[in-house]
Image (spheres, grey):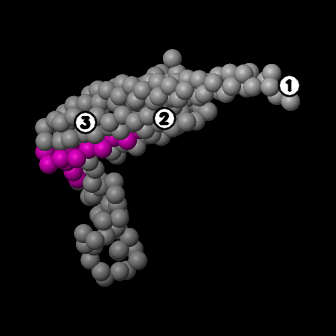
Amino acid sequence: MIRSMTGYGRVQGEWDGFTMAVELRSVNHRFCDLSVKLPKHLFFLEPSLKKALQKRFSRGHIDLVVQLEGTGRPLERLTLDRELAQQYHRVLEQLRKELGLHEAITLSHFVHYRDLIRTVESNGHLEKQTRLAERLVSRAMDALESARSEEGKAICKEFQSRVRGIRRSVDRIKNRLPRVIRA
């Protein structure tokens, strides 16, 4: 059976006020070329998703896009590293004294230290999202495979139609051949 390298698969799932959509697009390419776009907090899934795609598809340029939208509870919460903030404050205060500066240390001095505020997962959401993403990617791969098969059937029909046209032309040429030779 002929399978096309061109196809599209899209699935979505809902969970706890969020909608996750997974799209797979495939076009002709000599090798298996993968592009994966994930929400930032799911970047760690990229290697395993690429491996799953390579297991199912041997050729084609394949784009995987996972999008998350919704109004549910936050997936992450912010946390302040108080101990690190105190260390920064002590160092800045020491620097202020050593340089003889009179300006007081304010909150604006801390905004450039990105490691003071971190995001942490809230209530096991990441684990649930991970399972949902993996399940939806698997379903999207099924949809893409189905689309590629359907496109392959259409290509096969087109080839068969063209072969029939060529055969009719060959038959007409064979029928005219004796007259052409006599002429």
Q: Residue at x 25, y 39 (%)?
A: 20
**Is-magenta flag for residue 1?**
no
> In this figure, which residue is indicated by the disc labeled 1?
181
Main SS, magenta region, reads: strand
Residue 165 in the image: above or below residue 25: above
- How far is disc 3 from disc 2 in space, using C-alphas? 21 Å
In the rendered image, is residue 48 in sight?
A: no
**Secondary element at image label 1:** helix
Q: Earlier in the sequence, mark 3 or mark 2?
A: 2
Mark 1 residue type: Ile
> In this figure, which residue is indicated by the disc labeled 3?
12
Q: Earlier in the sequence, mark 3 or mark 1?
A: 3
Residue 56 in the image: above or below residue 50: above
Q: Residue at x 68, y 21 (%)?
A: 171
Q: Residue at x 47, y 40 (%)?
A: 35
> Would residue 173 be found to the left or right of residue 41 on screen?
right
* Residue 110 spot, x, y in % from top left: 30, 65
Q: Residue at x 31, y 70 (%)?
A: 109
User: Looking at this rendering, what residue extends furthest in the bottom direction?
Assistant: 102
Mark 3 residue type: Gln
Q: Which residues are magenta?
A: 64-80
Label 1 crowd bin: few (<14), some (14–19), many (20+), radius 10 Å: few
Q: Nearer the viewer, mark 3 or mark 1?
A: 1
Query: Is there CB contact under 8 Å for labels 3 and 1?
Result: no
* Residue 56 spot, x, y in % from top left: 46, 22
- How far is disc 1 from disc 2 in space, using C-alphas? 47 Å
